[in-house]
Amino acid sequence: AKHTEQHEGRLYNIPLEEVNAVFPHGLPHRFQQQIRTFNEARVMVRRPALELLGYLKGSNLRHPAVRYVIYGERGTGKTMTLCHVVHYCSKQGWLVLHIPDAHLWVKNCKELLQSSYNKDRLDQPLQASVWLKNFKASNEHFLQEIKTQKKYMWGKRESTEEGRPLREVVEQGLARARSACDAVGVLLRELKLQSHRGSFQLLVAVDGVNALWGRTTLRKEDKSPVCPEELTLVHNLRKMLRNDWSGGAIVTTLSQTGSLFKPSSAYTPQELLGKEGFDALDPFVPIPVPNYSPREFESCYSYYLERKWLQHEKARTEDGKAELQFLSGSNPRQLDRLAGPL
Amino acid sequence: PCRDTARALGSSPASLAPCRIMPVRWSRYNPSYLEPEVKKESYQKPLEELTEEERELMELKAVRPIKAAPPTLSSSVFSDPMISKFTNMMMKSGNKVLARSLMSQTLENIKRKQLEKYHKAPENEKETIECNPYVIFHQALKNCQPIIGLSNITKGGKTYQVPVPLTDNRKRFLAMKWLITECRDNKHRRTMMPEKLSQELLLAFNNEGPVIKRKHVLHKMAEANRAYAHFRWW
């Protein structure tokens, strides 16, 4: 996907087989419905994405990993920008560590086990095993090549020797739900240590990164609230996001829609990450994502017309177009919701 | 106290502006009040193109007070009176937000199902598949409207079901009512309303489904009770 600034505003097509391979879990729900209705996946090329791709192309992999934070108001296309970048990197052959929504890990968890590795922390077997399954689906060939560097013990009898492919670690995590979180931790640690060598490039893509530093809605058995540090998954992910490793990049998105205990008008990194999160992520490159420019709006409108999504007769007139633009305020999500029943 | 002074002065509540009384349901406006004009085109005409009557109307509007516009009236090009009537009938305890979102989800559902069928169909059948949810909605309602109705007339101590012609409004009301009650009662508890409604509308569009059956049952009853038709006196 070689896009330059001339392509801004146009839509590019991703073949359906690649969609299933690269994004087993990353795309927003409405976009997945759209793929099913139109039988194709079309992503719009926008300026923030082009900016990010430019930075990634020019980044020196010898230096420590650069952190990019995509932020913007609700519904302006941050998750889609992230998916664009993920698709580009997987096309280039990078190893992509894509976490679809970190908010899913800090709320609505049915099972919390006490971690066997560290007595203070809590495990989440369900979420960890789901994520491992999706990770395996997207990065099959890498798991075969990369070898472990240390011996890991899973409980008293099972262990993984040094030099075994990472696929065994993943399969161990999937087979035993209890050690799924530890498998995730081992995976992240290995990838971090080995990306130094330069045999592969690592992209860490996290959506909803403000979940890692906020509060959780989970409670322990004695009804005391759980801090995010006490969750193994969150702890390991935070270690990954510190830029003490080289050979890749970290791209994250802030998200207000899934966030807990934050006002709905908050969208800047300062407000959503809080003091802790901001200090932890401190030297980062912010990338704002605005609403549609007039050119992008026109391109989206003509795409809907061409695909027969806008069926109302009046929607084809100038008046209808002006009304759609006014009512949605050029916000991509509002336009999508308005164009639904029309 | 304000309402007493109004009654003492002998005029209806809404015509007294300085006394801040909200117009109550079914309140009657003073006959001097005029209807609000919603269409954008009428305001964009330059003065020369107006005929004599329209010029008189403009001058009258500058002098007389105008009634408040009801919330259902909109100047949007996408508004449809039938759809708003249907949304009002679906609404429960005044929750118009929920009713409107259910309606938009229903229309989107119909559009998605039809588009999926359209994209999978072979070339020669593509033109027969109708994808516009509004066209489907209107056609389905038309197919559900009964032609003749029954009314209870008591004669000589017994009540008879007499076949009677229906007005347009009554036909539309019956069609919408049957659709909504069918969706609310006879479906599985866990299915969502947009799902149920879109299914029913598509069936009614093809002249199949339980609502069409109910219309046919009514027609048959009216045909069976033809003998009592002369009991009607209007």
Image: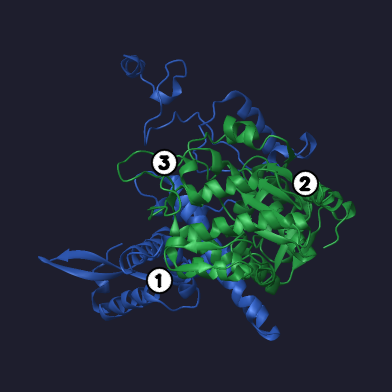
Amino acid type of disc 3?
Answer: Val
Among numbered discs 2 and 3, the one appearing first in the sequence: 2
Q: Secondary structure at mark 1?
A: loop
Q: Chain A: what color?
A: green
Question: Nearer the viewer's eye, disc 3 or disc 1?
Answer: 3
Amino acid type of disc 2?
Answer: Pro
Residue B147: mark in rendering: 1
Q: Which residue is mark 2?
A: A48
Q: Residues within 10 Å of mark 3 (few under 14, many from 20)?
A: some
Q: Position of residue B152 (x, y in %)?
A: 22, 65
Name the quadrant of the N terminus of chain A.
bottom right
Q: Is residue A64 left or right of residue B121?
A: right
Q: Which residue occupies the extreme left position in the image? A: B157
Q: Is residue B130 left or right of residue A293?
A: left
> How far apart are labels 3 and 1 at the CA level?
66 Å
Q: Secondary structure at mark 3?
A: loop
Amino acid type of disc 1?
Answer: Ile
- Chain letter for blue? B
Up-down relation of residue A211 to residue B57 (above or below): below
Q: Which residue is mark 3?
A: A226
Up-down relation of residue A63 to residue B110 (above or below): above
Q: Secondary structure at mark 2?
A: helix
Residue closest to the eye, B182 or B207 = B182
Mark 2 chain: A
Q: Residues within 10 Å of mark 2 (few under 14, many from 20)?
A: some
Q: Position of residue B116 (x, y in %)?
A: 60, 74
